[in-house]
Image (tube, coloured by chain):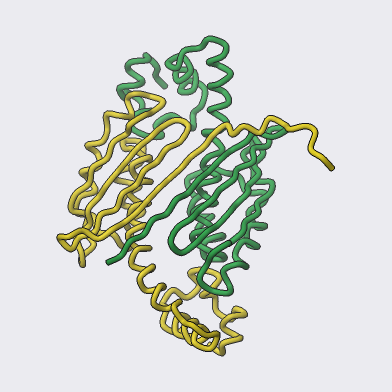
Amino acid sequence: MAQTFVNNRILCYTKNVHAGAINLDNGNTMARVRVDNTFLSAELEMEVKLPDLKIVSINGKIIRAFADECKNHATILQKAVGMRVGSGITRMVRETIGGSNGCNIFADMILEGCNALIMGFTVDELDKQLAAESDEAFGQVLVDMLENNPRIASCIAFTEGNDLRKRLGV
Amino acid sequence: MFEFTRSKSIGVEKRENGIYLVHGFLDDNVYTIELDVKVKTPELTIVSSKGYMKRYTTPECPKAPSILDDTVGLKIGGSDFDAKIKKLVGRGGCRHLADLFIECCNSVLPAVLQGQWKTARSNGMSKDDFINNLLTNESALRDRCITYSKGGDLAKRLGVSW
């Protein structure tokens, strides 16, 4: 049936988040995060030292906000310097950078940056693993991934007794 | 040398009878995920949730969105909401799907506020008066962050206290 009537489906709220991580010439890694939504725009960049994964520098800015006062709290980011990107960082960032005496926007952005950094390492590994050129080789890649991955029950792929494990005899 | 980028895009549309439909899209080097979440307001209850894994790493990944059926009936908000979703959707399905799902859910309240602000503005209300009203009437916003904290610069400037 031809469409004859269109309801007003204009979006009342939009949000875009972009996060990325790259290697730097000094051997460290830089994560950059940008958030744009109906109420605010913000950007953040943080340098993480390898291999200890410590945040060595961080800068951010609230460019646009519903309440102008939001633009005045970027110094709070310096509390993240020295934090290690690893176990426990989510709680530490939420309690130190976010919360009633902090900025939840910056806290979310730091965690987004940390995720980009960790995913950056994962991509390299996945790229090698998934380069298999036959079904047989790919099956072996999956066997290796399931047998060697310590993240049991971390997601549906690593659940004990799932179809994939049964099929591959893992 | 590694390089990774992730984009997440959220759009919220207001539908009939207090329903908000949230579209979420995640695209990065490894995954492409789409989500549609319907939320009933003012209760902020999830009434439907559908997801689609378009790019992934294992044959199990496309099954992950089926776990979203278990989110129907959950109420958005509360200090343990994110943790609950990370466990239910993340561990039971996919942590990247859970990440996008949380992003979608957290966009409903701002969408509601945007609607209220649009109406208030068209009635001639100033932004300061709107914020003052919010802080006076919406306890969920008070002390949410340093800007909206009791005794903060904003509260002082607007002369609001609680």
x and y, in percent, of residue B61 in the image? 56, 69
- The single residue placed furthest to the left in the displayed view is A26
Say if B138 sits above or below A48 in the image.
Answer: above
What residue appears at the point 54 percent right and 45 percent down from the top-left corner?
B104
Chain A takes which shade in the image? yellow
Camera-nearest residue between A13 and B107 = A13
What residue appears at the point 53 percent right and 15 percent down from the top-left corner?
B121
x and y, in percent, of residue A88 in the image? 33, 59
What residue appears at the point 32 percent right and 17 percent down from the top-left corner?
B156
In screen coordinates, is B15 left or right of B115? right
x and y, in percent, of residue A68 in the image? 34, 23
Camera-nearest residue between B143 and A50 = A50
Choose top left, top right, bottom left or bottom right for residue A168. Answer: bottom right
Say if A13 sits above or below A125 in the image.
Answer: above
x and y, in percent, of residue A32 in the image? 31, 49
In screen coordinates, is B24 left or right of A61? right
Chain B takes which shade in the image? green
Camera-nearest residue between B124 and A131 = A131
- The single residue placed furthest to the front in the displayed view is A2
